[in-house]
Image (tube, rainbow, N blue to C red):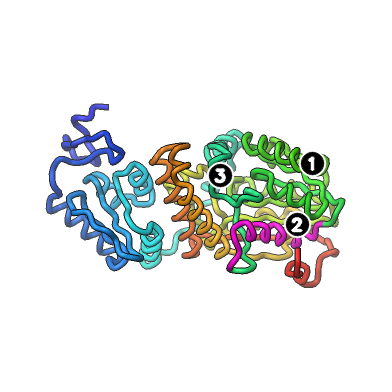
Amino acid sequence: MNRDRLEPLGVPNADYDFDDTFTGARYRSDPVAFDRWLLNQLKSRLDETHVKVVLWDAEDSRPGEGQAIVRFCDRAALWQVLINPALHFGDLYSAGRIKITGDILVLVDEAYRYLAKTESPSRRLSRSRLRAPSLSDSQRNIHHHYDIGNEFYKLWLDREALQYTCAYYAEPTMTIEQAQRAKMHHVCRKLRLKAGESVAEAGGGWGGFAIFMAKNYGVKVRSFNISREQIAYSREWAKRENLTHLVEFVENDFRNITGSYDAFVSIGMLEHAGAGNYKQLGELMRRVIRSDGRGLVHSIGRDRPEPLNAWISKRIFPGAYPPTLREMMDLFEDTGLSVLDVENIRLHYAETLRAWLQRFEENVESVRTMFDEAFVRAWRLYLAGSLMAFVHAKLQLFQVLFAPVGANNVPWTRAHVYAEGE
């Protein structure tokens, strides 16, 4: 690339003063009146008592408690954010062309408050946009997110079961380890697992839930996953626990699950399946669950159809889609399955992400050594943004319990779910 002359956003021959530090490109010239006018447009959208926005010529200052300062380091960064903040802000912050000092959660919180005041009801996504990713698409997407290194995830997930899904804070004072343990018991109780039964798991992560079910409920589990690194980790874990007679980790896609089982469970996989595959998944679940069996799907979702944030979809979670409950019903309608119960534990995911973000920051130097500063910033923004998405109800967390149509061996109350003890 010729660094002497660039043409950002239709402005020909703009002069840049490049330095080779992490902050990247900077204009030689001081901000002009138009830059300051653009900045004022941005300021008008935010509460300056919480978030202060400045240009590259502003003197350095320290934010007060509960405040954040956003500094645009070059003119093009300012223009790109105003044109398409959802896509460009993440890349510019990761590259150091936008700097945030203070509490990043304050900034993201304020951004969501602004969106809540200004956005209009979205039109329903057309069914043609609800893609059905192929097996090769799914493998590529999963590799992008999950196969970046087990050691990275071990830095900030819970230290007992490596659960990269919503925990369950039965008590608000729980640690992330206690809350993840409570989540797994919560799901197992809903499924009414009994020793000797068989379970099919779609999307098993690092194997923690399959091992938990085998150890605590005495069931036999076949766990299907297409992440090679996760499967290898899971198999080694099962060997260490002497549970290979109860747990089998299969490196294969959910579409290839075979056999007959007492229960089916999917924790955090549906977001990656593609809404166009829901009918096929529902038919598969009915095929592999015995007539007196039951199943549970635990998934991030939305109250209304919307695509995932453009930057997260591009940089962090390609191919992911959080469905609405209406869209999730494609799993059950006309597939021979009946919905028994639905629970939304949205705020539990906000607390889960708060715990993850805290651990991420505690181990940020290790993350920086594994990757680089751009990676650190990208994942910090991803975790903070996801946390606030659940706080502001832009995302939900649905647990849907189901059984084959006509199954009458279902509980009359929820008493078994909230039984004391573990």
Q: Position of residue 315 (x, y in %)?
A: 45, 42
Q: Position of residue 108 (x, y in %)?
A: 39, 59
Which tag is nearer the camera, tag 3 or tag 2? 3
The image quadrant that residue 292 belongs to is bottom right
- The residues tagged by marks 3 and 1 sit, at their Cα atoms, a distance apart of 24 Å
Rendered view: 368 above or below 55: above
- The residues tagged by marks 2 and 1 sit, at their Cα atoms, a distance apart of 35 Å
Q: Which mark is residue 35?
A: none
Residue at x 54%, y 49% (from the top left corner) = 156
Q: Residue furthest right?
A: 196
Q: Residue furthest top?
A: 2
Task: Identify the secondary structure beneath mark 2.
Answer: strand
Q: Amino acid at mark 2?
A: Leu
Question: For mark 2, what is the residue?
Answer: 337
Question: For mark 1, what is the residue?
Answer: 242
Residue at x 58%, y 63% (from the top left corner) = 348
| Magenta region | 173-193
Question: Relative to residue 340, is residue 3 drawn left or right?
Answer: left
Q: Amino acid at mark 3?
A: Tyr
Question: For mark 3, what is the residue?
Answer: 153
Question: Relative to residue 343, is residue 385 drawn left or right?
Answer: left
